[in-house]
Image (spheres, grey):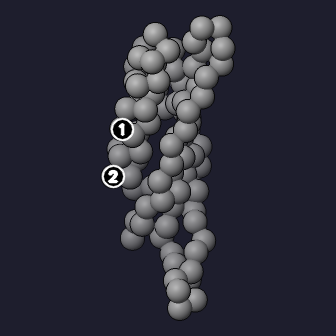
């Protein structure tokens, strides 16, 4: 059960990241409904401030963080995945 949950969570984290990357990004947090409801997913989008090697400010960079929380074998479990994307 735990291994199946962890595999499902990893797949779902990657799916949420991919779907979110394809959308028009809006900074903030949101709960994402998925599957049978035993596992809750929370997504956060934040602006990233960075510079090029030449010191030029980079704009339109966003970090997408997705965290999963669930209970298995009497213990709280969590997993997380994130990606930085450019969106003009």
Above or below, 21 against 50 in this view is above
Q: Residue at x 49, y 67 (%)?
A: 61
Answer yes or no: is residue 72 visible.
yes
Q: Which residue is mark 1?
A: 15
Tag 1: Cα neighbours inside 10 Å, few (<14), some, or many (≥20)? few
Give SS at disc 1: helix
Q: Residue at x 52, y 83 (%)?
A: 52
> Is 33 placed left or right of 45 in the picture?
left
Give SS at disc 2: helix
Outermost front residue: 3
**Residue 45 picture location, percent across and down:** 54, 51
Q: Which residue is mark 2?
A: 22
Cα distance, mark 2 to mark 1? 11 Å
Q: Quadrant of residue 68?
A: top right
**Residue 78 picture location, percent across and down:** 60, 28
Above or below, 62 against 5 in this view is below
Q: Nearer the viewer, residue 4 or 30?
A: 4
Answer yes or no: is residue 26 visible.
no
Q: Nearer the viewer, residue 73 or 47?
A: 73
> Is 22 placed left or right of 70 in the picture?
left
């Amino acid at each position: 059960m735990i291994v199946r949950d962890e595999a499902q969570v990893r797949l779902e984290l990657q799916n949420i990241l991919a779907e979110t990357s394809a959308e028009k990004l809006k900074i903030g947090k949101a709960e994402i409904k998925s599957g049978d409801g035993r596992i809750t997913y929370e997504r956060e989008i934040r602006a990233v401030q960075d510079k090029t090697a030449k010191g030029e400010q980079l704009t339109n960079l966003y970090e997408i963080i997705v965290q999963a929380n669930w209970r298995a074998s009497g213990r709280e479990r969590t997993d997380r995945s994130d990606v930085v994307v450019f969106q003009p």
